[in-house]
Image (spheres, rainbow, N blue to C red):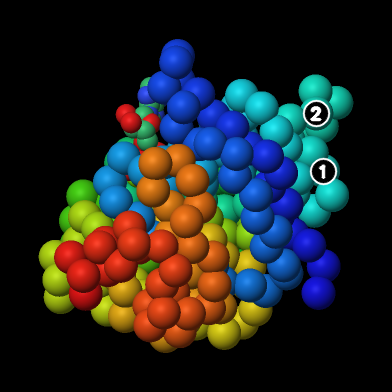
């Protein structure tokens, strides 16, 4: 399988705070990678470096062969192939559900309204929200908002999806619907990197689990390896607290 994301000696500093300390990973096409770790360990920063929302201080992040740290790389073009879903949805409040979804394909890719809306409705069906096309985000539950956010990200036909704690802001009864949509995507072969505290989901759906602490990758293995036979005492300590 092709290498989709190659992270090479990535260092990220905020002032003299080293948040990512020499990270190295390669993620292949179709892989589903869950990143777990304590709060403040740099998980969000790591994810944000993967679509250049944060600039690397040192090292390289290569997406589909294109180095995001190379000044000659058209970052906006690379980003069009990367969908991102955040903890707090970030939907546009003044646009209806369907308008949220068709905006980027029409604006950035010059798609016709007709074709963007057709695809938008297919995506709403995929996340189980066809009947919500004309409502505004404020009338949706958190879980529904997050499913719209996923549909919106998919509207650009990304081949990588990044998720930053997509279910952390949701009431418990909403979590399952969102995870189901994500699992479907994984089964369809999407390359996914997911920061999550949902250990059950990571066990069931991830091909790989990465544990980060103190800006380092302390564990990188299959869910069985990381959950059942962690190599680092800090992983054991973390898992005892969350499992
Ligand atoms: P996590 O997602 O694992 O909770 P973050 O990546 O959000 O961790 O943050 C890791 C560290 O980087 C924290 O100490 C945080 O305060 C710091 N940090 C994150 N973003 C910024 C920023 N824009 N400016 C300064 N410090 C930041
Ligand atoms: Mg975070």
Q: Is residue 215 above or below residue 6?
A: above
Q: Using the rendered view, name the quadrant where residue 145 is placed.
A: bottom left
Q: Residue furthest toward the top?
A: 15
- The quarter of the image holding the C terminus is bottom left
- Contact between marks 2 and 1 (CB within 8 A): the answer is yes
Q: Is residue 63 above or below residue 73?
A: below
- At 54% from the left and 65% from the top, the residue drawn is 220
Q: According to the image, label 2 marks what residue?
A: 70
Q: Is residue 107 visible?
A: no
Q: Which x, y percent locates residue 69?
A: 74, 30
Q: CA distance from mark 2 to mark 1?
A: 8 Å
Q: Nearer the viewer, residue 80 or 71?
A: 71
Q: Nearer the viewer, residue 11 or 108?
A: 11
Q: Which x, y percent locates residue 209?
A: 48, 69
- At 15% from the left and 75% from the top, the residue drawn is 173
Q: Is residue 113 above or below residue 3?
A: above
Q: Classify 10 Å Cα crowding around label 1: few (below 14), some (14-19), many (20 and above).
A: some
Q: Secondary structure at mark 2?
A: loop
Q: According to the image, label 1 marks what residue?
A: 66
Residue 129 relative to residue 117: left or right = left
Q: Which x, y percent locates residue 71?
A: 80, 23
Q: Nearer the viewer, residue 182 or 10?
A: 10
Q: Using the rendered view, name the quadrant where residue 16 is placed.
A: top left
Q: Nearer the viewer, residue 71 or 209?
A: 209
Q: Quadrant of ligand 2?
A: top left
Mark 1 beta carbon near ligand 1 (under 8 Å): no
Residue 175 relative to residue 121: left or right = left
- At 65% from the left and 49% from the top, the residue drawn is 24
Q: Secondary structure at mark 1?
A: strand
């Amino acid at each position: 399988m092709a290498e989709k994301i190659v992270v090479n000696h990535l260092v990220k500093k905020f002032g003299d705070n080293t948040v990512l300390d020499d990270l190295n990973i390669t993620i292949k096409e179709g892989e589903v990678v869950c990143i777990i770790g304590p709060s403040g360990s740099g998980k969000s920063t790591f994810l944000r470096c993967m679509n250049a929302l944060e600039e690397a201080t040192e090292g390289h992040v290569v997406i589909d062969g294109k180095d995001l740290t190379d000044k000659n790389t058209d970052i906006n073009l690379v980003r069009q192939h990367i969908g991102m879903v955040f903890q707090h949805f970030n939907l546009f409040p003044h646009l209806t559900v369907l308008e949220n979804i068709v905006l980027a394909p029409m604006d950035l890719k010059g798609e016709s309204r007709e074709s963007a809306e057709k695809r938008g409705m297919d995506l709403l069906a995929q996340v189980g929200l066809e009947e919500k096309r004309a409502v505004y985000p404020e009338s949706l539950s958190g879980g529904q908002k997050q499913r719209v956010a996923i549909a919106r990200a998919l509207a650009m036909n990304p081949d990588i999806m990044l998720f930053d704690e997509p279910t952390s802001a949701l009431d418990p009864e909403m979590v399952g619907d969102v995870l189901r949509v994500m699992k479907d995507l994984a089964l369809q072969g999407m390359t996914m990197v997911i920061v999550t505290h949902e250990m059950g989901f990571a066990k069931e759906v991830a091909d790989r689990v990465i544990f980060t602490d103190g800006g380092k990758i302390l564990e990188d293995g299959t869910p069985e390896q990381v959950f059942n036979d962690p190599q680092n005492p800090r992983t054991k300590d973390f898992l005892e607290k969350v499992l």
